[in-house]
Amino acid sequence: MADKTLDTLFHDTLKDIYYAERKILKSLPKMTRAAQSPELKAAFTKHKEQTEGQIDRLQQVFEIIGKPARGKTCDAIEGILAEGEEIMDEYKGSPALDAGLLAAAQAVEHYEITRYGTLKRWALVLCLEDAARLLDETLQEESQTDEDLTSIADASINAEAMKTAA
């Protein structure tokens, strides 16, 4: 246990979010295909492109700390993505499908926001300023994506979910 330091925790958490981002990248095309709203499809497509850049930034953080870019299974993201799959199956063709997909996407965003916020703060404590800058860049993107999803929900998705199926 003596070897368990903030450095170790930072590295473990970095591996966790690296795994999560790669899983998210794989799930976004399926969510895009399942979405009915053109705005939601566009938001998922945009986030897929951002996620690719976020993975690149994580690889840079691994380089900064001198460790290989490797993930470790993230049970939290597995559960959140499984809930999204369940929504796609159970609400397929329903007016509420997009509201459910959007909610699942925001659960992912909120998880990412907490991880990147924590990693950024730890990077600052560990005097890893370049890593903190990279992590903050991703944190800002994740926060903006969450705000964009809320705007889409408020503008149309939630109202559409109230309609009855034809």
Image (cartoon, rainbow, N blue to C red):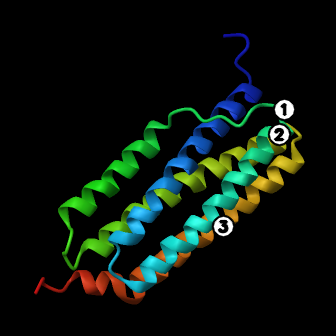
Looking at the image, which is closer to me, 64 or 116?
Answer: 64
Type of amino acid at the residue the image marks with label 3: Glu
Type of amino acid at the residue the image marks with label 2: Glu
Q: Residues within 10 Å of mark 3 (few under 14, many from 20)?
A: some
Looking at the image, which is closer to me, 32 or 157?
Answer: 32
What is the distance, in whole Å, between disc 3 and disc 2 at their CAs?
A: 21 Å
* Circle 3: element type: helix
Q: In the picture shown, does residue 98 fall above or below 39?
A: above
Label 3 close to label 2 by CB (< 8 Å) = no
The answer to whether 164 appears left or right of 149 in the picture is left
The count of marks equals 3
Type of amino acid at the residue the image marks with label 1: Gly
Q: Residues within 10 Å of mark 2 (few under 14, many from 20)?
A: few
* Circle 1: element type: loop
**Residue underneath mark 3:** 141
Residue 66: mark in rendering: 1
What is the distance, in whole Å, between disc 3 and disc 1 at their CAs?
A: 25 Å
Label 2 close to label 1 by CB (< 8 Å) = yes
Residue 14 % position (x, y)? 67, 39
Residue 63: mark in rendering: 2
The answer to whether 35 appears left or right of 9 in the picture is left
Nearer the observer: mark 3 or 2; the answer is: 2
Nearer the observer: mark 3 or 1; the answer is: 1
